[in-house]
Amino acid sequence: MSSSDTHPDSDQHSTQTDPDSQPSEQPREELTAQIDLLAAENRQLRERLAAVHRSQYHETALALCGVGLLCGLLAVLVPTASTVLFALAGTGVFGGVLTYFLTPERFISADVGQHVYSATAASYERLCGDLGLSERRVYLATDETTEADGTESWLFVPQTAETAIPEPTAFDSAFVVEKGQRGLSLRPTGSELFTAFENSLTEPLGTTAADLCDQLSDALVEDFELAQTIEYDTDRANGRLSVQISDALYGDGGQFDHPVVSLLAVGLAAGLSQPVEATVTGTRPLSVTFRWEPADDEPRSD
């Protein structure tokens, strides 16, 4: 009788615990719904941000057109200043129309580019460390220029501080293994930026460090918006250029082949027709020293 009395209890206990042992699907469904909701809200926020940027471009375009039309009206009312006013009217209307139709369709956060660049820079730093290469960063540009690709440029990381710098034509492989010239050759991050810079030039590329730095600084600040301000000091006799860059994008300027440093170095190498070595001397603000072999006719300072 004792066993028959306890048997129903054990059955009842089993039937009560079995349903509880199965995981509930409701929390998982709720979590999936919340994730989908957050993803949809993120898409809406990105679309709204892009719409705000586009509206700013459109408002600027309308303002330029309005100024142009106002100058045109004043030119009719004030004949004595009609020449200048008609010129301003044409400039305003043209600038407004150009701004309106050249409004970008997509806007990408600077953080996205920084994350992509940081991962690539870390990979190259690791590769150089595994190969036991030096800390030198030498930029070179060939004399050949194609309409499609622009000036061909390279970043060479020598094996030691005494390694000789080979000619750019020797970089037919990423690993340079010639005796006395061993190292790693890479495409610098500034190569495509320099091509875009060259294509936008309305004047010949400079041939002195000062002229090149003027042109490159304008491109970095005004065109590419990769920096806020750039100050520099040139020592032409000793082949040295010291640059200080404020509010440079893409994080720590001491990372491998930073885009701002890279563009300046590639531009100097192309304009001077000389290998240019870049050394980052500070990161807040970003300070870089560029060195090259001065021309024979340059007077050397003590």
Image (cartoon, rainbow, N blue to C red):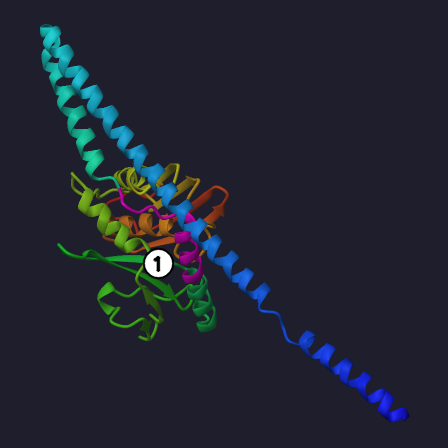
Quick one: 223 or 258, which is closer to the camera? Answer: 223
Residue 101 falls in which quadrant of the image? top left
Q: Is 107 one of the magenta-colored residues?
A: yes
Instruction: Reply above or below: 244 against 256.
Output: above
Q: Is 64 one of the magenta-colored residues?
A: no
Quick one: 84 or 69, which is closer to the camera? Answer: 69
Residue highlighted by disc 1: 138
- Quadrant of the image containing the C terminus: top left
Q: Where is residue 43 shown, x and y percent of the image? A: 40, 50
Quick one: 225 or 32, which is closer to the camera? Answer: 32
199 relative position to 44: left or right: left
Residue at left offset 40%, top offset 58%: 116
Q: Where is residue 91 shown, x and y percent of the image? A: 16, 25
Residue 71 falls in which quadrant of the image? top left
Disc 1 marks a residue whose amino acid type is: Val
134 relative position to 212: left or right: right
Q: Main secondary structure of the magenta part?
A: helix
Instruction: Reply above or below: 233 against 63.
Output: below
Residue at left offset 10%, top offset 10%: 76
Residue 234 falls in which quadrant of the image? top left
Q: Which residues are magenta?
A: 104-120
- Quadrant of the image containing the N terminus: bottom right
